[in-house]
Amino acid sequence: MAARIILYTGKGGVGKTSVAAASARRCAAAGLRTVVMSTDPAHSLADALDVALGAEPTEVAPLLHGQEVQAQQEMERHWEAVSDWLGELLAQRGVDQISAHELTVPPGMDELFSLLQIKRHDASGAYDVIVVDCAPTGETLRLLSFPDICTWWLEKVFPVRGRLVAAARPLARTMLDVNLPGEAVFAEVERLASNLVDMNAILRDRERTSIRLVTTPDRMVVKEAMRTFTYLNLYGYLTDAVVVNRVLPDATADGYFADWHATQREQLETVREGFAPVPVLTAPHLPRETIGAAMLDELGDAVFDGRDAHALLHHDLSRELTQDGDGRATLRLALPFAQPGDIDLKKVGLEVIVRVGGQKRTIMLPAALAGYETAGARFADGALEVEFERAGDGRTADAR
């Protein structure tokens, strides 16, 4: 049976690591073999669990393992041939050894390799639940967009690139004094891209994979959570719950914390209305740091309040494609909290390119729509609807 995969993300400092750890403990207590892993470069999972963790899963409780993925080790495992070739090339150009080693890894690439640990655990069959403590939202969104990029690269660019380099290698060696990458380098890049394509399928499997946003009832944090929710829908990832952490109790409605309490209640209402029908789970502002088994279990009891932590709490699809019998089709893409002026849309072949703010998503249409053109688009009720019709009657789409 395939593992249930739950990813937690949120703005730095909202308590996502504590919520992820509490969720994992609750899954293990329900009798499920569980691993909780941190892909955040600034690891704090070991602090939350109050145990020592390493690069490999470590048993921290019955049926529960913890892991702090070491991105550098993952990078060395998956990028060795490319790194060696680039390092040699830079060294030949006079770059010192230390600098050459640093320059062989594109920014953020080492953290990308951390995601492959999810695929590894899923393939092993050793766990029923995989809980992931992700990096803060901006980094998480960047990493989650990588599989789409790699899919495009693998399908559109890599075969052509390989043929061009093979043809250019003799010329480069004789005239340019440059060693072009060998077959081992191309094999490594292709293997990495293929693994990330597989990761894409796992992360977008809405029957078992979901993302949970962790926020606090503070206006700036809630706004970021809303933007993140929009982008997750843009990328096609399912958000099955929003966790509002550190909610002041009603006992603070009077006195020194009265204004803060009132502001939190306003933001809670904003979250419940804005994210509906996605479930909103809440946790109180606990009197002590959420460290160790007892405090994590108290947090887990508050967040889930009788629910199963491993359950899929929401099932709505963010993207649907429908066709009728009159030669028309409609693509519906949920973009909650987006504004019409933020959306840019165009179709190139079977690719529909949607931009929202600084984020871009390329959606591949089925081959059956190869002869269709865009017939119009509209944005209403938090969703973008793009209409297509058979070539001959279409017009350029403009999202309004």
Image (cartoon, rainbow, N blue to C red):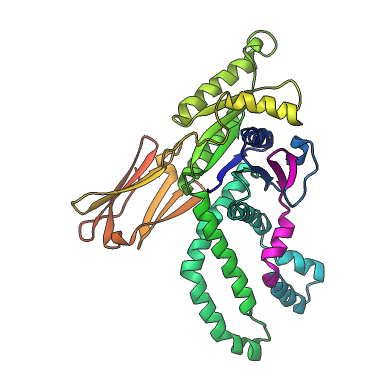
From the top left corner, tell me how far across and down residue 132 is, in percent: 63, 44
Q: Residue at x 67, y 64 (%)?
A: 78
Up-down relation of residue 308 to residue 124 (above or below): above
Q: Residue at x 52, y 72 (%)?
A: 158
From the top left corner, tell me how far across and down residue 332 is, in percent: 35, 45
Farthest top residue in view: 254
From the top left corner, tell me how far across and down residue 197 is, in percent: 52, 60
Q: Is residue 203 left or right of residue 73?
A: left
Q: Is residue 341 left or right of residue 83?
A: left
Residue 80 among those drawn in magenta? yes
Stretch in magenta: 58-82
From where the camera sits, is residue 348 visible?
yes
In this rendering, the count of numbered labels is 0
Farthest left residue in view: 326
Farthest bottom residue in view: 174
Name the image quarter holding the C terminus.
top left
* Front-lying residue, 212 or 160: 212
* Front-lying residue, 278 or 33: 33
* Front-lying residue, 126 or 239: 126
From the top left corner, tell me how far across and down residue 113 is, in percent: 65, 57
Up-down relation of residue 159 to residue 249 (above or below): below
